[in-house]
Image (cartoon, rainbow, N blue to C red):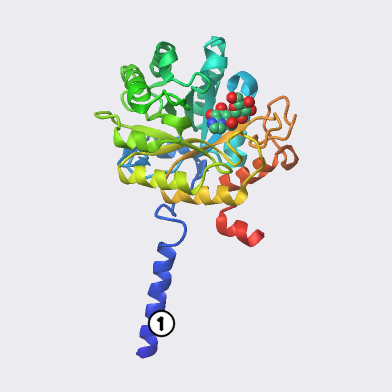
Amino acid sequence: MKKLSIVSIALAVLVLAASCGDKGKYAGDSHLAIEDGKTVVERYGSLQVIGTDLCDQNGKPVQIRGMSSHGLQWYGKYANKDVIKWLRDDWNCQAWRAALYTQGGYIGNPVLKDKVITSIEACIETGMYVLVDWHVLGDKDPLLYAVDAEDFFTEIAQKYGDKANIIYEICNEPNGKNVTWKDNIKPYAERIIAAIRKYDPDNVIIVGTPNWSGDVLSAARDPILNQKNIMYTVHFYTGSQGRERRAEIKKALLKGLPIFATEWGCTKDSGDGGVFEKETLQWTEFLRENNISWINWSVNNKGEDSGVLKFNADRNAKGNWKEEDLSKAGVFIRRIMRNELDYATWKKEK
Ligand code: IDC
């Protein structure tokens, strides 16, 4: 009797430990690009935001993971179906982000929109989600090109708003100390959301936050009201931002802010400076535990440390990459995406 109860207590402790283990409350998620012959978009359908969670069409919390293009004006050649399909099939990517720079990109060179369209069409064909990223960066204040943004997003919503694949990211990284949530970003977001909602009543729209999308608390204190399926962006580079930013994210979540990490890198925030493996895995565990979807920066062969291809590899942008085509970041991020590497595994390997 005594023996039995000790055994059962031990068992109970084991079960409890397993269920509250280091994988967090979403441990059951498969994160698969294809499962039982079905693409992620076939399985999840139209995404929706419930509380702070991104959820599938049935209201189940899901975490989406994917890769970003580099600036489409520079490495837009990778925004094609071969590469996107390769990322799905070999990398287990569920999403692709098309980074359409505004200043230095679309504003002076509107044909770049074709790269976004190619990305969208490829993601529809491959059953992946696609983030349409209006990449505000050097222009700092999203209000500067708000009229162009309204036209652009109206067109995308009109053409593709009925497709479950589309996720709108309306301003990558507002920045500069005069660009505030209250006076710049929120009014801009309200305008663009209204433009999109004329044609697309429900796809997810993600709003950038001040300080290069590093300040989710400003948005948490003053969120956009009376709109459904709105999320907010946090960006980070694991060699530059760590514990402090995670604490802010936690606070914002507690205030009820739904967050999507639409861009992060495993280097310093210059996009270079080495690959920070341990710090990266601390971040990916955190994102998983908190059900925050993410997109990694980026697919290019420029030779910068955050680029997943080696310098000059796959110059024809065909996909079908061999291990020797991948940079250190490429090998590392691919393993994370394929569910082959988490913090515990990494420690064992060291
Ligand atoms: C970087 C690219 C780099 C390019 C630079 C130009 O990696 O090759 O020369 O843009 O502006 C961001 C931005 C993203 C940056 C990236 C790395 O959203 O455009 O890309 N980064 O610096 N925010 C934080 C880091």
Q: Is mark 1 within 8 Å of ligand 1?
A: no
Residue drawn at x 62%, y 31% is 299
Percent position of residue 181, x then y: 36, 27
Please tell me which residue lies in front, 109 or 335. Answer: 109
Residue 81 can be seen in this image:
no
Quadrant including the N terminus: bottom left
Percent position of residue 118, x then y: 55, 20
Q: Which amino acid does the dot numbered 1 rest on? A: Val
In the rendered view, tell whether residue 327 sits above or below residue 302. below
Residue 34 can be seen in this image:
yes
Choose top left, top right, bottom left or bottom right for residue 109. Answer: top right
Residue drawn at x 40%, y 16% is 143
Percent position of residue 302, x then y: 70, 29
The quarter of the rendering in which ligand 1 is drawn is: top right
Quadrant including the C terminus: bottom right
Residue drawn at x 61%, y 56% is 346
Percent position of residue 7, x then y: 41, 82
User: Is 175 left, or right, of 307 in this rendering?
Assistant: left
User: Is 181 left, or right, of 165 in this rendering?
Assistant: left
Choose top left, top right, bottom left or bottom right for residue 188. Answer: top left
In the rendered view, tell whether residue 341 sits above or below residue 82. below
What residue does disc 1 label? 7
